Structures are given as structure tokens and as C-alpha cells.
Amino acid sequence: MSFAVPTKPVDSASDRLGAIRDVKCTVASLQAPVAVLNLTRSGVLVEAAEPLRVGSQHIGVFAIDKQRLEFQLRVTHLQSSPGASRHAGHRIGLAFHLRSGRDYESLDRLMAFADGGAQVIAGPWAKTAATDAPRRGRAA
């Protein structure tokens, strides 16, 4: 297990949104990169030029600083509408499908970055979290 220690405080929601915009994401099934609109511990809301089928699973790669974090994602919802944003207007809700301790550690790093550049500190308990066994109390 690890926890985040902010290196700079997040002063407002706009600072967090700015940090989220710095997260680069690609989904293997899509031709173009997606725009990250929101990011939580349960999933990510993206906007893409192409739709994805609800219920389908995809590999998503998030680039933060010089790190690449890979997650298995499941499409939970799709909203298609013509919009004035930079993409065609397909808003796609993707849930993280976390299967191992490494997946949880990667999610901790991603969330720390989104929360304003926090550093992830691993304690002596990190040895058990780094195994490939799912965490207790969470569905695999």
C-alpha cells in the first residue's frame, strides 16, 4: 500500500482540472488519443472521435511525467452528441478493472498526479501490495 504526499497544494478545483488535462491517455482500440475530462479512483471520463461499445473491455495507457501506466478498462457508458469541443463528441465512461497489487499501485500514482503533483510514498507494507494477488475486500 502507498499513500500520496502533496508536493504542492491543490488550491482549487480548477487546479485539479488543470492537472487532469496534463494526463495523456490512449486507448488501444481507438485511432486517436482521447481527451481526459475527469478522473476518479473508480474510472475516467474521456472524449473521443470514435465511440466504444458499452460493456467492452480495452487497454488504456496513461502517460504522466515520464511514466506509462497501463490499465484494463471497461466501458460503462457512452454519450454521443455533436459538440463544439475538440473531438467529435463521444463521451465515454471507462471503469478501471484492477486485478493485482501493481494495478492498485499504478492507480495510486495516477491519482496522486491528478491531485496536483503529489508524490507516492511506499512504506514497508508495499511488499504485500506489490504482489499479483488481489487486495482483500475488493472484487477481482
Image (spheres, rainbow, N blue to C red):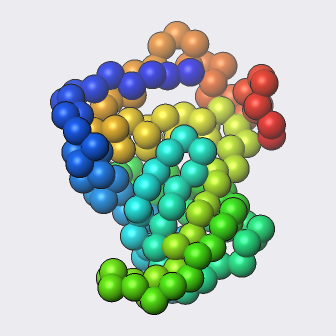
Residue 61 visible in rendering: no
Answer left or right for 73 relative to 20: right
Where does residue 14 sit, x and y in percent of width and height? Answer: 23, 48
Residue under the point 72% across and 66% down: 57
Query: Furthest-top residue in view?
Result: 124
Camera-side residue: 86 or 125?
86
Could you tell me residue 106's position as x and y percent?
Answer: 52, 41
- Give the vertical position of 108 relative to 89 (above or below): above
Quadrant occupied by the C terminus:
top right
- Tell me, yes or no, if residue 78 can be seen here: yes
- Total labels drawn: 0
136 over 108 or under it: above or below? above
Measuring 40% from the left and 85% from the top, which residue is drawn there?
A: 83
Rendered location of residue 64, percent (x, y)? 35, 52
Q: Which of 123/9 is in front?
A: 9
Q: Nearer the viewer, residue 137 or 103?
A: 137
Q: Quadrant of residue 120?
A: top left
Q: Residue at x 49, y 22 (%)?
A: 2
8 relative to 129 in the view: left or right: left
The answer to whether 34 is drawn above or below residue 3 in the figure is below
**Res 52 → quadrant:** bottom right
Is residue 97 toward the left or the right of residue 105 in the image?
right
Viewport quadrant of the N terminus:
top right
Residue placed at 73% from the left, 42% from the top?
99
